[in-house]
Image (cartoon, rainbow, N blue to C red):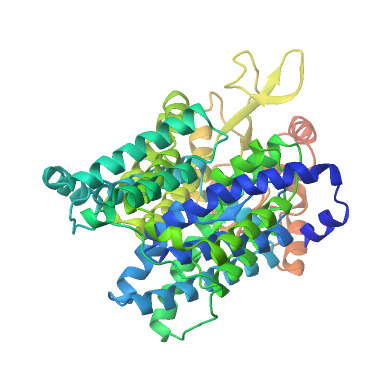
Amino acid sequence: MPGVESFKSYDRSWLRSDLGAGLSVAAIALPVGIAYADLAGVPAVIGMYSAIFPLLAYALFGSSRQLMTGPDAATCIIVAASLGPLAGGDPERYLALMVILTLMTGILYVVAGVSRLGFIANFLSQPILTGYLNGIALIIIAGQLQKLFGYSGTEEEFFPKLIEFIVQVQDSHLPTLVLGLSLLIALVILRRVAPKLPAALVVVIAGIAAVVMLGLDQSGVAVLGSVPAGLPSLQIATVDLNTFKTLFADAAGIALVSFTSGVLTAKSFARRNRYAINANQELIAFGASNIASGLAQGFPVTGADSRTAVNNAMGGKTQLVGIVAAGTMLLILFFMTEPLGFVPTAALAAVIMVSAVGLFDFKELRDLYEISHRELVLSVTTTLGVLILGVLPGVLLAVALSLFWLLTVVSRPHDGVLGRVKGIKGFHNIADFPGATTIPGLILYRFEANLVFFNADYFRDRLRATIAAAETPVEWVVVDASSINVIDITALQKIDELREELAAQGIVLNVARAKRNLMKFFNHDWGVKRREAYAGHRFDTIKSAVRAFNKRAGKEAAPGADSQNLPR
């Protein structure tokens, strides 16, 4: 529990900053939690539970001093997409499944943290994660249009929702429309002119005042309704095996997306404040936060960038900020829930829409356009996939595109023929140095990637092409293996075949600078025999291989007709 250690060495001079930051975070987190509850399809009080209790858990287990956990727009929309079909329109079953989903997400986080799987934070490339979150943002915005404008809508998918908006907007409820647009405009202006002000709270309070003073609820403006006070009661239901499997898959998707997004937020603010976070500890902390949310009957949570930004802007120093914010919201939950019943739905829609616009990363798309059109296409494809296929298939699409990008990069890596460059020590790629010279009859070839099943054919084909393009007859080929850190049995078999093929042409295949740990994935005794069998074709340096080539006495018969090749 890193939080416990930090509290033991707490500097009292930080207290004022942490108290102020905690109150500011509470002012943002409470209305956002209520708004996101609507996004997740649950009562407002569930959003309050999800905003309060995860903060207390993260304060103990988190390694970030600034990160605030809580409801997240992308996570909430995934929850709604996951539970809607399973609940079949039954609100009680929906809530019961939500608790199981939240606890399952938390447990997966903890298991991943104990297993030291923090590297999964890098599993989704940044352009693809941006594309996914951009798609989520557009879905959220489309989903709030009917609440902001006050017309009746039935469509569930993104593009039908847009068409429905165009058709139904003329039938908007005028009081709801005026109130919603007024609050939306006020929220945008406040965020620009007074960034330190809790704009979401101000807008919600203004909405409550308008409803109470003008009697808008009597004019058809939808309001939140009764919000129960006090703590939640612990309830955990049971599900059948098929439902469990579905929830498990959805929980894994939520954990992947929410951790990737949340840990990026944690890393960003840690970098700004010049300290490091522990990704494995963050997995455990996010797990504890979700378990706390689940036990409190809440929905899955992650690192909240907007609340973390408020904390940082207000000078928060430690996770005491989260405890202060949680305590403040608990007091409101106990003693001030009655006014929350008059919160207009249009005000919550305004808060959600502004948050969703903040989720859409225009800057990243602009940067991708300037830097890499290929990765821009991947990002936009992910966005379109989310909009067309849906939220949950969008997670699978994001993973598939990340794997596709990875395999594309590593299956056709950079390679080159090496030669001498006047005035520079060593051997260098002749494509980079047009004046480089090579040794007639000898090809020095470098393959700049690990050699495994999905690029072994490419390695073989590139080496064949290099030999065919040589200006003089080739007698020796020396593979510079310094860039190869991993090799598998498929690659070894392909190289054995290549050795036999080249031997039939009178060409000797050798290797230089092979790392000693290349055989770590194979049985030790087999590896020892292989090294012994091909010791004569293995060189510690390229220079020693060149010396051996130059000193050989005449043309020898190419050795190695028996089918084993690569040493260690």
Residue 268, position in %: x, y?
Answer: 63, 40
- On the question of residue 564 being in view, the answer is no
| Residue most extreme to the front | 213
Tell me the residue at 46%/32% (across/down).
190
- On the question of residue 393 being in view, the answer is yes
Q: Nearer the viewer, residue 221 or 60?
A: 221
Quadrant position of residue 429:
top right
Q: Which of 199 and 474 is in front in this view?
A: 199
In which quadrant of the rendered image does the C terminus lie?
bottom right
In screen coordinates, is 316 left or right of 259? right
Tell me the residue at 45%/39% (across/down).
358
Q: Nearer the viewer, residue 304 or 12?
A: 12
Residue 21, position in %: x, y?
Answer: 67, 44
In which quadrant of the rendered image does the N terminus lie?
bottom right
Residue 145, position in %: x, y?
Answer: 26, 47
Quadrant position of residue 439:
top right
Q: Nearer the viewer, residue 221 or 61?
A: 221
